[in-house]
Image (cartoon, rainbow, N blue to C red):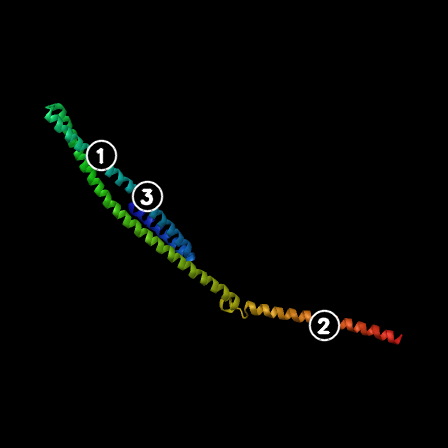
Amino acid sequence: MSHLLTRIKDSIASDLNELLDQKEQKNPIAMLNQYLRRCEKETERVRELLNRQYVLKDTFIREYHHAAEMSEKRKHQAEIAERASETELYEFALREQEDYARKAERLKASYESTLRQLEQLEQKYAEMKRKLKDMYLKRMELMSRENIANANLRMERVLRPENVFGQSFSSFEESEMYLGRLEQKINADYNHSTIDARISRLERELEKKQG
């Protein structure tokens, strides 16, 4: 049963990857934008962890100083209680001093560990931002190339459509031929109307002379 489920899972993953490959081939810029958005989210998560780590670092160092100060305070109070032969007070102050000392030691270790983790996160965050910027630049380069390719294709279709569609004349050539035919027709119509008008005028003039 588990083998069958594994085969089904692998089949679905294969089909999904094939669809993604087809989408990438059809519109690589759109796929690149999806990758960039994913990387932006991951970078944002690291930035949030980095901010949280800064807060922890400040909290640990603040609590460490407090515990260290309290340890020194209880130590001094224990010495006073001992000199005053206040045994119960001395033992209480000594226990407090030892507790604060252990707490300060733990907080110091946590603070140092947080600093190391903070350094690693800062390096990772800087690397992710650098890679993200590189991908932005790569997207700009690809978009520029895509624009040039599309512009060249459109110009090729207009100037030399025979290379794209197998036609024998370009759009400009067809337009020029159409304009030529249109010019001939207009000139012919103009000449015809002019001749008709001149003949009519000549006929009227002849009629006047004969009359």
Quadrant in which residue 203 is drawn = bottom right
Density class for disc 1 (Cα within 10 Å; few <14, some 14-19, many ≥20) is: some
Q: Nearer the viewer, residue 45 or 111?
A: 111
The residue beneath circle 3 is: 48
Quadrant in which residue 208 is drawn = bottom right
The residue under label 1 is which amino acid type?
Answer: His
* Residue sticking out furthest to the right: 211
Q: Residue at x 26, y 45 (%)?
A: 118
Please tell me which of labels 1 and 2 falls first in the chain: 1
Classify 62 as above or below 184: above
The residue beneath circle 2 is: 191
Please tell me which of labels 3 and 2 falls first in the chain: 3
Does residue 135 appear in the picture of this structure? Answer: yes
Q: Nearer the viewer, residue 209 or 67?
A: 67
Left/right of residue 79 with respect to residue 38 in the rendered view: left
Q: Which mark is residue 66?
A: 1
Q: Using the numbered discs, state the Cα–Cα distance from disc 3 to disc 1 in whole angstroms.
A: 27 Å
Classify 31 as above or below 193: above
